[in-house]
Amino acid sequence: MSEQLPSHEAGTRRERVVILGAAGRDFHNFNVIYRDDPNAEVVAFTAQQIPHISDRSYPPELAGPLYPNGIRIYPEDDLEKLIESLDVDRCVMAYSDVSHEAVMHLASRVNAAGADFVMHGVRQTLLRSRLPVVAVCAVRTGAGKSQTSRAVVALLREAGKRVAVLRHPMPYGDLNAQRVQRFATVEDLETHRVTIEEREEYEPHIAAGSVVFAGVDYAEILAAAEREADVLVWDGGNNDTSFLEADVYITVVDPHRPGHELTYYPGETNLRLADVIVINKIDSAVPDDVETVRANVRRANPRALVLDAASPLAIDDVDVLRGRRVLAIEDGPTLTHGGMRIGAGYLAARRVSAEIIDPRPYAVGEIADTYQNYPETGPILPAMGYGEAQIRDLEATIERAVREGGVEAVVVGTPVDLGRIVRIPVPCTRVRYELQVLGRPTLRDVLAPVLGK
């Protein structure tokens, strides 16, 4: 931690900045605000939430001529040491799905160490497209952005529009290679060696015939997508705000976590930005919780159109689960920083009277570390897969649960065909869920400004 990164010009002190991130929003903020700013010098990034994304560098090819050596990425745990050793003036908050309380604890750490704590406004980081844009965002991870995005894309395609999906960044590997990524086939997923989290987001779009763009440099990504489309759909990540200025801004809220729409960053920002708010999962939520969310929505954003929606579950093969001892595997980020204790697979298995086996006693390696880092996780297995070692630990945990826990079947509640990635030694079935808007206004109604263009 002793190295001091050089200033651009000897004798000239630019404001020294650390960007606090998780390999996504942080890089975007740097690209659009700091990369070409001669008055500021980003001396480090920090990394949080995602395993294995620190101890690397933002490469000079992406960082630009003001940064011939690139920019180092450190664990957020080193923040106070960084502020002191790199003589930092400003720390910029640039990651999502953290509670308002956690944000202020982070701000207090920064201020106590002697630096300013900054949260950039939405307008500073928006990119503007020459095409119509629909943005789909949420108040928490796991609220239902993915099925909402798929429903939006389906309606646009029915109207004869060529649609490109721009997915929130997940650049967890070689950043140069991930500058601009295009996914049109399952083979593209193999070519780019994507993580399980990336597969969960890209595969359903590809299966529906959509082309997905993602990566690091969203100005270049936007230009590439505009060459292939009539309409762009921003498919958000976590509860981050859109990178694109939107003609229709949709925010999904989750009554399984009532009150979180007002207490998580930047989810509340999405709530207040929305033209359209989708109250999802009302088919499985407690009615009083639905009404709590509805009242909070009305107070925070009375101008928004509100849609009620369900996410009905469909099991590929019910007989695989009925009467058996079942292991439920769920979307990883929804369970970890999303904070959900159960998921679609768990709910589906319970509905057919399967016995749910708790995988936590059988967790090994990095899967055991995940439970330790997120102790509120329930009796479900998060489909963590941010590298080969983690994927192997996931596979070993499944095998141990079968061997020692008597698991007779597996239900996969993630949107990905997990059997293509890990070996599952017992019968396995998938649970699928699509958005079902109830009553009026309909999704087609709220998309009218884009459908008519």
Image: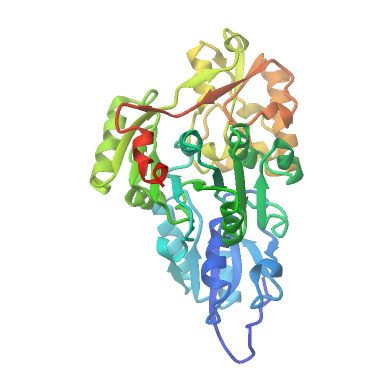
Q: Residue at x 41, y 42 (%)?
A: 451
Q: Is residue 218 above or below residue 110?
A: above
- Which quarter of the figure has residue 417? top right
Colour convention of the picture: rainbow
304 or 144: nearer the eye? 304
Whether residue 77 is visible, yes or no, is no
Q: Residue at x 61, y 50 (%)?
A: 214
Q: Residue at x 26, y 32 (%)?
A: 291
- Which quarter of the figure has residue 190? top right
Q: Quadrant of the N terminus?
A: bottom right
Residue 428 horizontal/vertical position (percent): 66, 18
Residue 435 horizontal/vertical position (percent): 44, 29
Q: Is residue 251 left or right of residue 300?
A: right
Q: Is residue 248 above or below residue 40?
A: above
Whether residue 197 is visible, yes or no, is yes
Q: Residue at x 44, y 37 (%)?
A: 143
